[in-house]
Amino acid sequence: QVQLVESGGGLVQAGGSLRLSCAASGRSFSTYAMGWFQQAPGKEREFVGAVTRSGGTTIYADSVKGRFTISRDNAKNTVYLQMNSLKPEDTAVYYCAATNRYGDYRVMSVYNYWGQGTQVTVSS
């Protein structure tokens, strides 16, 4: 079992930055690939980015490439989402997710565990 708790959300002006954190409880954090997803009001949850178990490989949605960076610290059981050059369209609830499966990390169904989400609001 893995429990995930996101933090770091808030209100920021367009062009600003935020760093989200996702702390995982339980053992063997390094055996889980981690993903970030966003869900805007009235929309489906969408893939933002993911990082492999070692942190050696990251993938991103086209909409955030070059602006967002995912990293992880396996010693601290934490994954981060650094968000720069934020836009109003980035406004959403951001969820982190964990999986011990192998597959397409852009797909929600690959993930076993989800956090409760943290709100990010970008004002224009």
Image (cartoon, rainbow, N blue to C red):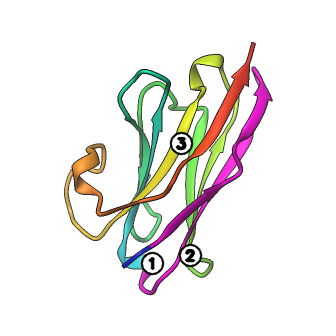
* Quadrant that contains the N terminus: bottom left
The residue lying at 47 percent from left, 64 percent from top is 55
Q: Is residue 18 magenta?
A: yes
82 shown above or below 101: above
- Mark 1 or 2 closer to N-term? 1
* Residue extending furthest toward the top: 124
**Left or right of residue 34, residue 91 in this image:** right
The span from disc 2 to disc 3 (Cα, nearest Å) is 18 Å
73 shown above or below 103: below
**Left or right of residue 49, residue 19 in this image:** right
Q: What numbered label is drawn on residue 94?
A: 3
- Mark 3 or 1 closer to N-term? 1
The span from disc 1 to disc 2 (Cα, nearest Å) is 6 Å
- Closer to us: mark 3 or mark 1? 3
The magenta stretch is 3-28
**Which is more toward the observer, 56 or 32?**
32
Q: Is residue 102 magenta?
A: no
Residue 107 percent location from the top left of the image:
26, 44
Q: What numbered label is drawn on residue 77?
A: 2
Residue 58 percent location from the top left of the image:
43, 51
Residue hosting label 1: 29
Residue 44 percent location from the top left of the image:
35, 29
